[in-house]
């Protein structure tokens, strides 16, 4: 019995204190995350392609405001077919003509405005690509920290099971324990190896995903020193701030403005265009002739052409107005869903950090002490361990999903919130005796309280 009691302190020391952060803790920016974001935004081909599209549209703006190209005409008028009569006959001459078309006043300015708004549309697409890449990096980094936190937790559980196996063996050898306790400890250790392999695969996958985003080799290592508790929680955005960040909403507004300009242009297209012509006609030894002319286009098919074009753009304008309302409504729904999830996950995090983890650890240590003193069962101690590990794992999941909701708010995404998922902590029996994953955490891992197909994931610009 004395030999058994001497092992109890060692077991208690194996159980680590739960990861807690004081309420006044304000984490510093993570340099690893900052480098990942910088490398991704500097070299990702999707962002480069979006930038090129903006530059292309910028080049269209000055083109739209330029006058139509003039035309130069050369000719010869001659009397008869036998010889050139220029200089002999008054009606024989060479001709050099110049014609410059002039659109109706205001058309060039409207066409330039339409092209300039096209730059805003492509800029909104570029912003969406950039925000999407930033969100992907932040989600990938959160996933990596979650998996590595789970690996540390698994290592702590492995240490306990090793000590528990030694204690069960000692109790069995002195006739105070059963062979079943020893076999159960060995079984649990073997099961943990499966979880370790699963987490290793999840970690490599998370690293490969981040390396793809920053255009590195998939196997390049990404060392981290921070944990999920070290990630700063961003300030919560209001619905107005989310709307101001939304590229889809900005693009929808720009489309309305562009269509309004097209309506104005269609109205002006019912007005005629002009062309000024000037010509010189040398006649050899005779005095040269010259001419100046003005031509006017006749929109005589306006009812079937220009009027129809005006009606087309007016219909389009009504559709664009409806699209703005649809995008704003969906964005507000997503913002409300995420705000609710953030509030719930904050309460869940605080409950774990300020109470549940402490209670779970105390229950675990008490079960260890009772088993070491011969007053408790091995299964009771094992279930207490599983409860503590399960609570620690749920705490990590709550932190990860809280980050996922903030990332989605910052991204102003119209689609459902993309969850941050880690690996499996341990065997199926681990949940025995532990608290279940909170409903808020489970809900945050799915679409945040809305149907998956409610509204488009993106908006045409």
Image (cartoon, helix red, strand yellow):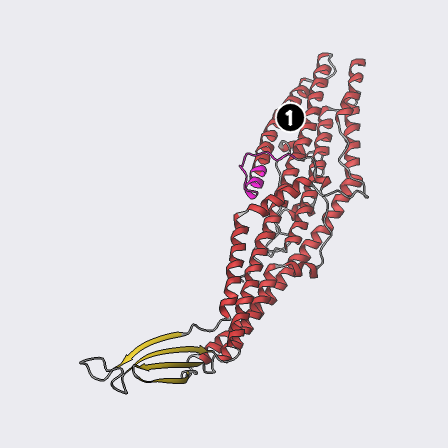
Residue at (74% x, 12% y) in the render: 174
* Viewer can see residue 213: yes
Q: Position of residue 68 (x, y in %)?
A: 44, 73
Q: Which residues are magenta?
A: 206-223
Residue at (42% x, 79% y) in the render: 305
**Residue on which the image places disc 1:** 188
Residue 398 in which image quadrant: top right
Q: Position of residue 37 (x, y in %)?
A: 62, 45
Residue at (47% x, 82% y) in the render: 270
**Mark 1 residue crowding within 10 angstroms, few (<14) / some (14–19) / many (20+):** many
Q: Residue furthest top?
A: 174
SS for callout 1: helix
* Viewer can see residue 456: no
In magenta stretch: residue 238: no
Q: Is residue 336 above or below residue 17?
A: below
Q: Is residue 204 above or below residue 305?
A: above
Q: Residue furthest left?
A: 82
């Amino acid at each position: 019995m004395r030999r058994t009691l001497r092992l109890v302190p060692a077991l208690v020391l194996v159980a680590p204190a739960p990861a807690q952060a004081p309420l006044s803790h304000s984490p510093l920016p993570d340099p690893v995350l900052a480098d990942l974001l910088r490398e991704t935004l500097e070299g990702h081909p999707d962002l480069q392609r979006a930038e090129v599209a903006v530059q292309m549209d910028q080049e269209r703006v000055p083109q739209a405001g330029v006058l139509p190209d003039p035309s130069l005409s050369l000719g010869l008028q001659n009397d008869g077919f036998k010889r050139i009569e220029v200089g002999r006959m008054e009606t024989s001459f060479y001709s050099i003509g110049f014609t410059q078309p002039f659109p109706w006043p205001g058309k060039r300015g409207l066409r330039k405005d339409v092209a300039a708004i096209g730059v805003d549309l492509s800029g909104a697409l570029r912003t969406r690509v950039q925000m999407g890449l930033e969100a992907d990096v932040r989600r990938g980094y959160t996933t990596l920290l979650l998996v590595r936190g789970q690996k540390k937790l698994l290592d702590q559980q492995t240490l306990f099971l090793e000590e528990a196996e030694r204690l069960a063996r000692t109790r069995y050898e002195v006739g105070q324990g059963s062979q079943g306790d020893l076999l159960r400890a060995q079984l649990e250790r073997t099961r943990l190896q499966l979880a370790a392999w699963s987490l290793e695969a999840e970690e490599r996958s998370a690293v490969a995903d981040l390396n793809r985003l920053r255009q590195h080799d998939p196997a390049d290592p990404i060392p981290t020193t921070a944990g999920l508790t070290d990630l700063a929680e961003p300030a919560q955005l209001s619905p107005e701030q989310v709307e101001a960040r939304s590229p889809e909403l900005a693009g929808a507004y720009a489309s309305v403005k562009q269509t309004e300009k097209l309506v104005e242009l269609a109205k002006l297209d019912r007005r005629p265009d002009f062309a000024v012509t000037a010509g010189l006609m040398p006649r050899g030894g005779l005095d040269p002739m010259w001419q100046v002319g003005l031509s006017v286009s006749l929109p005589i098919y306006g009812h079937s052409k220009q009027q129809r074009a005006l009606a087309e753009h007016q219909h389009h304008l009504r559709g664009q107005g409806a699209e703005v309302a649809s995008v704003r409504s969906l964005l507000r729904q997503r913002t409300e869903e995420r705000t609710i999830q953030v509030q719930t996950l904050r309460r869940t995090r605080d409950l774990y950090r300020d109470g549940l983890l402490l209670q779970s650890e105390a229950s675990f240590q008490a079960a260890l002490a009772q088993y070491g003193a011969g007053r408790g069962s091995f299964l009771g101690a094992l279930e207490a361990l599983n409860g503590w590990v399960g609570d620690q794992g749920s705490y990590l999941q709550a932190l990860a999903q809280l980050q996922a909701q903030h990332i989605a708010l910052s991204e102003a995404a119209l689609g459902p919130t993309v969850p941050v998922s880690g690996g499996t902590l341990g065997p199926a029996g681990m949940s025995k005796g532990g608290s279940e994953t909170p409903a808020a955490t489970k809900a945050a891992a799915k679409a945040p309280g809305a149907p998956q197909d409610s509204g488009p994931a993106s908006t045409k610009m």
